[in-house]
Structures are given as structure tokens and as C-alpha cells.
Image (tube, rainbow, N blue to C red):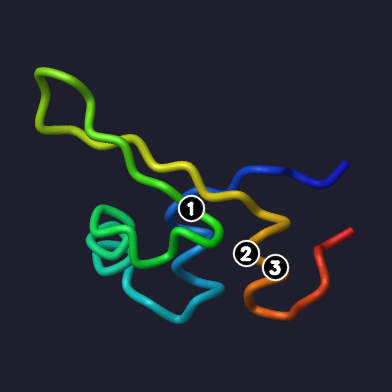
Amino acid sequence: MVKNRLSTKEAAKLLGLPEQTLRVFLQSSKFSEFATAIKREGSKHWIYYINAPRLYDYLKIKEPA
């Protein structure tokens, strides 16, 4: 079964970016084609959602089996 969600670590590796750079980009909606970042209310923490099939499509690569 293929995952529909990737961690920031997995996505950063696929994109060739440092993980912290990816987080900053997500917080500024740079990769809205496949991901979003939501700031938790009353907190300094963020939640990241990275849609795996959309990222693979963005990168024009095949999904892992």
C-alpha cells in the first residue's frame, strides 16, 4: 500500500532541500501544489501535511510500490 502522506524529512530528501528549509517554504505557502502548513492555535508549533501523490506528480516521478 502506498502512503498518501509524507514526513517533512522524506519530502525534503525527494526535493533535495534541507528539512528546515522545506518547513520555512511550507509555512510561506511556497509548495501549495502538494503541501500545507498550519500553525497550531495558541502555540509556536506547526503541523505539516505533504500529499505524497501530488508531490510525485510535481516532481514527475513514479510513486514507490
Q: Residues at badges 1 and 3 in contact (C-beta under 8 Å)?
A: no
Determine the residue positioned at 25% across, 37% down: 46
Q: Classify mark 2: helix, strand or loop.
A: helix
The circle drawn on residue 55 is: 2
Q: Which of 27 and 11 lies nearest the eye of the viewer?
A: 27
Label 3 crowding class (10 Å Cα cut-off): few <14, some 14-19, many 20+?
some
Q: Amino acid at mark 3?
A: Tyr
Q: Residues at badges 2 and 3 in contact (C-beta under 8 Å)?
A: yes
Looking at the image, tell me whether mark 2 or mark 1 is earlier in sequence order.
Answer: 1
Q: Classify mark 1: helix, strand or loop.
A: strand
Q: Residues at badges 2 and 1 in contact (C-beta under 8 Å)?
A: yes
Quarter residue 31 falls in? bottom left
In percent of width and height, residue 60 lies at: 73, 80
Q: Which of 10 and 49 lies nearest the eye of the viewer?
A: 49
Looking at the image, tell me whether mark 1 or mark 3 is earlier in sequence order.
Answer: 1
Residue 31 left/right relative to 56: left
Q: Amino acid at mark 1?
A: Ala
Q: Amino acid at mark 2?
A: Leu
In percent of width and height, residue 12 lies at: 44, 67
In percent of width and height, residue 35 lies at: 48, 53
Residue 43 left/right relative to 52: left
Q: Classify mark 3: helix, strand or loop.
A: helix
The CA distance from mark 1 to mark 3 is 12 Å
Determine the residue positioned at 10% across, 18% down: 42
Report which residue position mark 3 lands on: 56
Determine the residue positioned at 70% across, 68% down: 56
Report which residue position mark 1 lands on: 35
